[in-house]
């Protein structure tokens, strides 16, 4: 008689255990909501939309959807996984109640959006105070990256249109505060636009920048301590003039399109004027040089603008463009920062590539698809996505250390949020017991202790 041997042990499925909680690691996000006071702020902001004798609070409903999105959901119905665990997430509204709230907020239009955004701004300032040395403004400057993202649509949704990449969908503009190399980033602006919206539309960039500035603490809403970075889509006369306007005086670092005039000016730069580019660690960037342009190419642009160009050997397989020269790839950006070597300014602008990481995280957190039909509804969804991304940025900033603080949403879900736990009730208190053999149980429990040590909101 032969004994059957398989690669995995055979496990029989029977009745469910009532004391086991799935997605128990989501308690980290729940505690972040509680310690930052986000629940109180959102609840107060959405009070006008609470119906008489309503059972569920509109702020709690909206935060439940944001928690579901942070845990990996991509539609309103995914709030059901929170409803299944009332011991951790409390009472969760039914799907029809959630849909009715989204419709009500969408009907209110700018009024509802302003209420949500004001509450987020208030909580953000408090979170940065709690974070201390880990806050994004500890370096003396706040960096806001603005970039567009294509969101594909597979049905005829309102304002969905053909995009410049020959796809179909929407083209929102997003803004993120950069947390530097030691962290991630948090969203501060989300402007929903049709798919055929231009990449370099100055009015859209100005509106997105205004939304982003309104999310920052008041002292960073004007002045050189706030840096706005964009790709070449922001390199327009109107947008740079708005950034440098008297009384606003923002710092900026915007990409520029290589025009014929710039290309001609690059060809006139003597070899002695080129400086080797730098890397983050201070070493030389191999095969890259930078130089500053002046003269006629700056006519018509704001006073104080500096124009820097970089030439670099293209990576193997890359195709050169008509605007490249001598077999080297050319890129250009403009800034109004003075007193800093151009190699450091170019390195600072190159770090704008972190915005691509933020966009990838946003796609993995509810922005892969806009699940609703009307534009007003999807704008509310975009605010929910930003709430979810806020929590995914604030929790590591307040509770995680070392490499764990840089984990992206997918890794946080796989290692922390998906951990199951046993629910034990004793002395009228509920306790979650995580399995000791789970590789990241120590990370979860240490993070809980960090959050518990924070002061409770006023």
Image: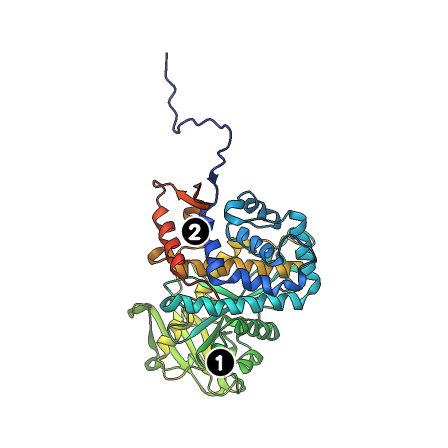
The answer to whether 82 is drawn above or below residue 370 in the figure is above
Task: Tell me the residue at 46%/77% (across/down).
Answer: 226
Which residue in the structure is indicated by mark 1? 250
Whole-angstrom CA distance, mark 1 to mark 2, is: 35 Å
Task: Count residues near mark 2 (Cα–Cα under 10 Å), then give few for <14, some for 14-19, many for 20+.
Answer: many
The spot of residue 154 in percent (x, y) is: 64, 51
Q: Which mark is residue 113?
A: none
Nearest to the observer: residue 21 or residue 252: 21
Which residue in the structure is indicated by mark 2? 412
> In the structure shown, which secondary structural element does the residue marked by tag 1 occupy?
loop
Task: Tell me the residue at 36%/63% (across/down).
Answer: 182
> In the structure shown, which secondary structural element does the residue marked by tag 2 occupy?
helix
The spot of residue 203 in percent (x, y) is: 61, 75
The spot of residue 288 in percent (x, y) is: 35, 70
- Left or right of 10: which side holds 211? right
Whether label 1 touches label 2, CB < 8 Å: no
Nearest to the observer: residue 177 or residue 105: 105
Q: In what quadrant of the picture does the N terminus appear?
A: top left
Q: Nearer the viewer, mark 1 or mark 2?
A: 2
- Asked if residue 191 shows in the view, the reply is no
């Amino acid at each position: 008689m032969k004994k059957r041997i398989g690669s995995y042990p055979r496990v029989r499925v029977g009745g469910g255990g009532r004391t086991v909680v799935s997605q128990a690691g989501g308690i980290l996000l729940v505690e972040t909501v509680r310690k930052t006071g986000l629940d109180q702020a959102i609840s107060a902001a959405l009070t006008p939309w609470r119906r008489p004798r309503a059972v569920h609070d509109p702020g709690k409903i909206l935060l439940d959807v944001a928690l579901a999105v942070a845990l990996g959901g991509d539609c309103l119905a995914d709030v059901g996984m929170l409803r299944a665990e009332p011991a951790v997430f409390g009472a969760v509204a039914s799907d029809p109640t959630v849909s009715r709230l989204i419709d009500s907020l969408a009907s209110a239009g700018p009024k509802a959006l302003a209420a949500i955004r004001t509450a987020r701004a208030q909580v953000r300032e408090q979170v940065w105070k709690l974070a201390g040395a880990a806050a994004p403004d500890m370096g003396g400057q706040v960096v806001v990256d603005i970039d567009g993202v294509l969101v594909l649509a597979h049905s005829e949704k309102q304002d969905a249109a053909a995009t410049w990449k020959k796809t179909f969908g929407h083209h929102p503009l997003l803004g993120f505060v950069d947390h530097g190399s030691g962290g991630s980033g948090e969203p501060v602006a989300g402007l929903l636009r049709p798919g055929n919206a231009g990449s370099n539309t100055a009015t859209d960039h100005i509106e997105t920048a205004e939304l982003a500035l309104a999310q920052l603490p008041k002292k960073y809403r004007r002045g050189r301590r706030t840096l706005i970075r964009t790709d070449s889509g922001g390199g327009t006369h109107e947008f740079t003039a708005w950034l440098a306007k008297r009384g606003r005086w923002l710092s900026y670092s915007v990409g520029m399109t290589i025009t014929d005039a710039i290309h001609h000016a690059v060809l006139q730069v003597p070899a002695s004027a080129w400086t080797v580019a730098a890397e983050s660690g201070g070493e030389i960037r191999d095969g890259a040089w930078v130089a500053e342009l002046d003269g006629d190419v700056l006519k018509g642009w704001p006073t104080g603008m500096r124009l820097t160009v970089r030439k670099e050997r293209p990576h193997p397989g890359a195709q050169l463009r008509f605007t490249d020269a001598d077999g080297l790839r050319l890129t250009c950006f403009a800034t109004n920062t003075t007193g800093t070597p151009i190699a450091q300014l170019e390195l600072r602008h190159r770090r704008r590539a972190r915005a691509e990481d933020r966009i990838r995280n946003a796609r993995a957190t509810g922005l892969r698809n806009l699940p609703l039909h009307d534009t007003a509804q999807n704008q509310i969804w975009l605010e929910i996505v930003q709430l979810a991304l806020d929590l995914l940025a604030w929790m590591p900033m307040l509770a995680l250390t070392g490499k764990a603080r840089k984990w992206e949403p997918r890794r946080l879900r796989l290692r922390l949020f998906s951990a199951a736990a046993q629910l034990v009730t004793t002395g009228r208190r509920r306790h979650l017991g995580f399995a000791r053999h789970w590789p990241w149980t120590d990370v979860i429990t240490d993070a809980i202790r960090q959050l518990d040590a924070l002061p409770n909101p006023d």
